[in-house]
């Protein structure tokens, strides 16, 4: 076992040392017995099977008698569901079942999904349903599911399901949704405002009162999405002999998915196993539990058959979570040298129709704004707004890039206003190396202080500027324009906290055979 492990971890030359080379054999023996591998270049273990086409994804798992699912999805941004007629679909060839929320509800401990990253400030009933109940709140929301002997037959039958929709006014823009007379994104809501987040420190008012310069800045950061090569997918099978449900899911959160399914389906932990095979990309879009991940396992329990659903690309565009969509309205106070004195303003964040994963994107954006710069006073109000769009959660950055973008645009405007070089303005505002460790008055979502433990930010930026020959860029730009080409250059400094403390845990077990098992939660 030790030799095979060393062969995987060591470079090829070290894995097969020549018998007549005592020195290299000694190095090899030391590497085998020293499993710390500190300071060594470790070969990645996961690459060979993926590069050779030997990866195993959810859709590569084939179980005898597997049924396949297709979802009936809303074509409307907002509508009341007055009735669902599935009789024609149920009579279609190969159909095993057509299920709505009414069919699932008796088997669920509650009808709405649990919320990830819980926050007591959020109103009740803000999470999605496994299948729509009385209304649909965005295009693509699942209303029913058809289970058939093949995906083709399931899709054909899904087209036969008739849903009686009463179209309702929709809220399509988060800023306009704040107006008192704006359409409500959800029935029964008194307002489209889900919650507000306030961040602040320092003497903001006095800083603005004495500031020699001020400017206002409005920004719009559009929506985005995560489009991995592999879409989402779920396969579930119930084993009656072991009385155990096994769920394969292309998810980034296997442990959390298992916990939520145990809660919703009222299953003992020994009766449920969640497996994550190879995942063909996630980027945050698979960092939550989706309604489909409840519906498919429950359908398997109800039908006592394996049930599979593989998301197609159209479904991903319609129903997988998205990110961002923020308005920033800022006022910046600064002195004649370009140094920041204070910033105040508002963020309007589009949460979409539901809140499956808290409001961490908006929160992180509000705390990320200062970045690696010295900001003496700061006051921001983040308004999280419900709209009739796909729900938003973090994708590739979790709100931090949005805060970084806003700060960098503010510094560009300061440089433009004072006629200063953009790099010089940034250098004057960066936290100096002598100030490390540098603790800001802001708090992370876990409640711990946002602290920069080490670093030389000015040196890092200047190293990059030297590498790209920033001082001579204007000459290259002029020459390019003379030949009909347009060149531009941007400067930005960003940072992001590491770790998600203080709530991680790990369990290490050493078995009788010497095998070590590590469970990280």
Image (cartoon, rainbow, N blue to C red):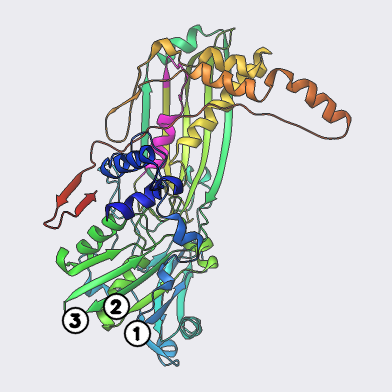
Secondary structure type for disc 2? helix
- Asked whether residue 183 appears in the rendered view, the answer is yes
- Residue 386: x percent and y percent? 43, 49
Image-quadrant location for residue 482: top right
- Asked whether residue 111 appears in the rendered view, the answer is no
Sequence-wise, which precedes: disc 2 or disc 1?
Answer: 1
Q: Are marks 1 and 3 in contact (CB under 8 Å)?
A: no
Q: Residues within 10 Å of mark 3 (few under 14, many from 20)?
A: few
Between the residue at mark 2 and the residue at mark 3, the CA separation in whole angstroms equals 11 Å
Residue labelled with disc 3: 240
- Residue 29: x percent and y percent? 30, 43
Residue labelled with disc 2: 300
Can you tell which mark lies on residue 64? 1
Q: Which residue occupies the extreme left position in the image?
A: 512
Residue drawn at 20 percent across, 66 percent down:
109
Within the magenta stretch, is there residue 360?
yes
Q: Are marks 2 and 3 in contact (CB under 8 Å)?
A: no
Say above or below: 401 vs 229. above
Say above or below: 63 vs 448. below
Residue drawn at 74 percent across, 19 percent down:
472
- Residue 447: x percent and y percent? 27, 31
Comparing labels 1 and 3, the label whose residue is closer to the camera: 1
Q: Which residue occupies the extreme front position in the image?
A: 20
Between the residue at mark 2 and the residue at mark 1, the CA separation in whole angstroms equals 13 Å
Within the magenta stretch, is there residue 494?
no
Residue drawn at 56 percent across, 40 percent down:
221
Q: Is residue 221 left or right of residue 237?
A: right
Image-quadrant location for residue 61: bottom left
Q: Is residue 429 left or right of residue 111?
A: right
What's the magenta region?
359-378
């Amino acid at each position: 076992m030790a030799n095979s492990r060393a062969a995987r971890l060591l470079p090829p030359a070290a894995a097969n040392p020549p018998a007549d080379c005592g020195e290299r054999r000694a190095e090899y023996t030391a590497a085998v017995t020293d499993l710390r591998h500190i300071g060594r270049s470790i070969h990645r273990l996961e690459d060979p099977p993926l590069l050779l086409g030997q990866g195993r994804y959810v859709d590569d798992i084939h179980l005898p008698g597997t049924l396949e699912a297709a979802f009936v999805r809303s074509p409307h941004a907002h509508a009341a569901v007055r009735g669902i007629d599935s009789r024609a679909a149920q009579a279609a060839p190969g159909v095993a079942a057509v299920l709505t929320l009414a069919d699932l509800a008796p088997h669920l401990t509650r009808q709405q999904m649990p919320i990830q990253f819980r926050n007591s400030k959020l109103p009740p009933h803000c999470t999605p349903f496994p299948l729509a109940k009385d209304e649909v709140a965005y295009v693509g929301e699942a209303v029913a599911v058809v289970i058939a002997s093949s995906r083709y037959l399931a899709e054909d039958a899904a087209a036969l399901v008739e849903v009686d929709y009463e179209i309702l006014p929709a809220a399509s823009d988060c800023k306009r949704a704040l107006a008192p007379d704006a359409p409500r994104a959800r029935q029964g809501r008194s307002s489209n405002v889900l919650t507000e987040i306030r961040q602040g420190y320092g003497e903001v008012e006095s800083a603005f009162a004495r500031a020699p310069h001020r400017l206002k800045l409005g920004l719009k950061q559009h929506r985005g999405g995560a489009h991995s090569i592999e879409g989402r997918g779920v396969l579930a099978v119930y084993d009656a002999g072991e009385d155990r449900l096994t769920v394969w899911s292309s998810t980034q959160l296997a442990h959390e998915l298992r916990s939520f399914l145990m809660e919703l389906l009222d299953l003992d932990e020994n009766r449920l196993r969640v497996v994550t095979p190879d995942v063909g990309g996630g980027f945050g879009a698979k960092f939550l539990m989706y309604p489909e991940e409840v519906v498919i396992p429950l359908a398997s329990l109800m039908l006592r058959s394996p049930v599979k659903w593989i998301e197609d690309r159209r479904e991903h565009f319609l129903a997988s979570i998205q990110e961002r969509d923020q308005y920033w309205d800022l006022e910046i106070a600064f002195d004649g040298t370009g140094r920041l004195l204070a910033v105040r303003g508002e963020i309007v964040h589009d949460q979409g129709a539901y809140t499956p994963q808290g409001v961490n994107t908006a929160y992180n954006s509000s705390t990320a704004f200062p970045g690696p710069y010295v900001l003496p006073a700061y006051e921001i109000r983040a308004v999280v707004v419900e709209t009739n769009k796909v729900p938003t959660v973090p994708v590739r950055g979790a709100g931090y890039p949005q805060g970084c973008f806003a700060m960098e645009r503010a510094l560009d405007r300061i440089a433009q206003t004072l006629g200063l070089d953009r790099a010089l303005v940034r250098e004057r505002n960066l936290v100096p190396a002598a100030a490390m460790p540098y603790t800001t008055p802001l708090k992370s979502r876990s409640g711990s202080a946002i602290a920069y433990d080490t670093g030389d930010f000015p040196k890092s930026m200047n190293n990059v500027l030297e590498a790209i020959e920033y001082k001579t860029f204007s000459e290259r730009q002029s020459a390019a324009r003379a030949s009909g080409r347009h060149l531009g250059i941007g400067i930005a400094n960003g940072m992001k906290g590491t770790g998600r403390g203080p709530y991680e845990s790990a369990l290490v077990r050493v078995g009788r055979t010497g095998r070590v098992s590590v469970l990280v939660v």
